Image: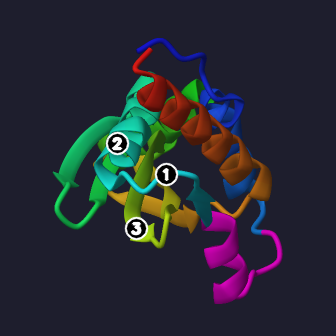
Amino acid sequence: MVCSGCGALDATATLADSVFEEKKKTRTQLEMRQMQTREFDTKDVKMALKAMLNVLQDDDFIIEQVNAEIGFFKANKNLDTEHTTAKVWGTFWWGPNAQWVENTVIDCTASVTQYGERIRVRANFQLKKMNNRGGVEKVYTIDDPKFYQEFFTKVDKGIFIEKEKI
């Protein structure tokens, strides 16, 4: 399957930095659910699940768990976001006890369910900043509507490709 990268997923390093700089207004649970959910014109849950997995793999996510029976999966992507300056100064001042942000992990959980003659997809993306000792520094749910819109546009293209068997 050949797909071009999703702009939102290709720019994940930039997104990771911008999400952690300052937390924007808090969205309600209903607003988050609406942003994270889309319906598609097919009733084939397994085909849609496969299309979503392909989209994530095209964007360098590693699939960790899949349960096709209930239409659920979990995936993640690791980004090297280490800042050399923080590493150097941390080591200079604190020696072997120094800690700095070394990488960012993007976790994705998603579910695909049949909803009449259509399927409903809900995807949740979360960013975790990890330090050089493997500890979690910060965790945030991605709440950028543009990110989800671009992801679901890519899923829509993936479903089309699966339907047409391209």
* Image quarter hosting the C terminus: top left
Q: Magenta span has 25?
A: yes
Q: Earlier in the sequence, mark 3 or mark 1?
A: 1
- For the image shown, how many numbered marks are present on the structure? 3
Secondary structure of residue under mark 3: strand
Q: Are marks 3 and 1 in contact (CB under 8 Å)?
A: no
Q: Residues within 10 Å of mark 1 (few under 14, many from 20)?
A: some
The amino acid type of the residue labelled 1 equals: Thr
Query: Sequence-wise, which precedes: disc 1 or disc 2?
Result: 1
Q: Nearer the viewer, residue 43 or 78?
A: 43
Q: For mark 3, what is the residue?
A: 114
Distance between the Cα atoms at labels 1 and 2? 9 Å
Counting from the top left corner in percent of width and height, residue 149 is at 72, 49
Q: Is residue 96 magenta?
A: no
For mark 2, what is the residue? 47
- Residue type, label 2: Met
Contact between labelled residues 2 and 3, with CB atoms less than 8 Å apart: no
Contact between labelled residues 2 and 1, with CB atoms less than 8 Å apart? yes
Q: With respect to residue 92, does 74 lie above or below?
A: below
Q: Which residue is mark 1?
A: 42
Q: Can you say whether 117 is above or below 84 in the image?
A: below
Q: Secondary structure at mark 1?
A: loop
Q: Residue at x 35, y 47 (%)?
A: 49
Q: Is residue 74 above or below residue 158?
A: below
Name the side, left or right, on which 9 lies relative to 138.
Answer: right
* CA separation in Å, label 3 and label 1: 9 Å
The image quarter containing residue 150 is top right
- Mark 3 and mark 2 lie on one chain; the one further toward the N terminus is 2
Q: Position of residue 2 (x, y in %)?
A: 48, 12
* Prevalent SS, magenta region: helix
First to last magenta residue range = 24-36
